[in-house]
Image (spheres, rainbow, N blue to C red):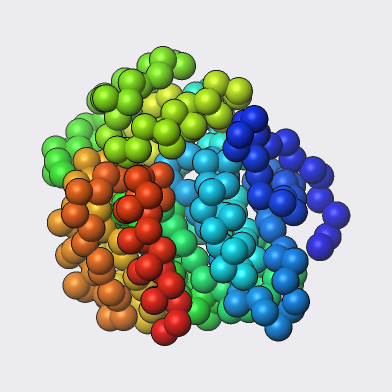
Amino acid sequence: MQKFKEAPYLELENYKAPKGANFIFIPMRDNKKIRLAYWKNDKLNEEIVGTVLLQQGHNEFIEKYYECIQELLDRNFNVVCFDWRGQGMSDRMIEDSNKQYIEDFSIHIKDLSYIINEVINKNFNRPLFGIGHSMGGHLLLLSQKNNQKNFKAIILSAPMLGFKYEKILFLLSNCMKIFSKKNKYFLFSKPNMGKETPFEQNDLTSDLIRYKRTQKLVRKKPSIRLWGVTNAWVNATKNSLNKMRKKNWYKLINTPICIINPLSDRVVNPEKTKEMANNLQNCKIHNIENCEHEILMEKDSLRSDFWKIFDNFIEI
């Protein structure tokens, strides 16, 4: 592995990074730094199943997935993950570090492709599998037009493929382009600036312990999370969704895809996920009852469902 600058990371007293963690900063072509973490499995080379690129959603960060990373290591994978630019401990795109700002998701795809070609392909065992949650699932799918040759398969957890009231959302986005600056908070993005959402009001998970664990991580470094989305980010999301829904786009995607679709999701629209799954040529969808948005942060019984589906799928 090329010598990169070490990056900081967070741990709790009873929640540590899996053994063998390496956290580094990877400079992109525009000199923005991406915080990347990797684990090279200590099993014999012939026992290694491959490498998993594990990518989180909007406003998440690597540390949130230590439990999942350990479960992948236990399955004899190497693991690589990184904070998307603009969030976690990667460089922000604007001076106000509290805002989620991106003008075009293509910049995320360029970062992803660079990391695959310059880091993963040169240093880690094949084959490569991808796991993407929410926005990470959207971006992994979006990247397949350029990266199908790199992935054996991808698993998408509650991918950001649509929203319940998106017609109104997108209409407002068009209005905001006229009446508000792109770096301003979107109309219905109410920044709470460090105020924690009580568990009873959260729309991510029904698991109290895992929810509180994430809160404790944020308390150690509040700047690791964002406090609202900008007009630019909502417009970029709209444009990316519209692109993916064009027939000539999804017909080009041949990657084997498994989608985990929580039916109680209140963040993304499970029905929009079903529509995309039906359009993709090589896709299996698993609709999970009584599951909130973050199945990997859910109760043990639901997480067990995820891993059963994963284990069956990777043997394709």
Residue 294 visible to an observer of this rendering = no
Q: Give the image location of residue 294, x and y in percent.
A: 35, 46
Q: Give the image location of residue 20, x and y in percent.
A: 74, 54
Quadrant containing the C terminus is: bottom left
Q: Give the image location of residue 245, x and y in percent.
A: 24, 64
Quarter assignment of residue 252: bottom left
- In the rendered view, does 82 fall on the left or right side of 33? left
Which residue is located at x 67 percent, y 79 percent?
Answer: 47
Q: Nearer the viewer, residue 75 or 80?
A: 75
Q: Residue furthest right?
A: 3
Q: Give the image location of residue 75, x and y in percent.
A: 56, 68
| Whether residue 112 is situated above or below residue 281 in the rendered picture | above
Which residue is located at x 35 percent, y 45 percent?
Answer: 299
Quadrant containing the N terminus is: bottom right
| Whether residue 86 is situated above or below residue 272 in the rendered picture | above
- In the rendered view, does 290 fall on the left or right side of 97? left
| Whether residue 210 is situated above or below residue 291 in the rendered picture | above
Figure label count: 0
- In the rendered view, does 275 fall on the left or right side of 12? left
Which residue is located at x 39 percent, y 27 percent?
Answer: 228
Residue 256 visible to an observer of this rendering = yes
Quarter assignment of residue 309: bottom left
- In the rendered view, does 238 fall on the left or right side of 28? left
Q: Nearer the viewer, residue 307 or 110?
A: 307
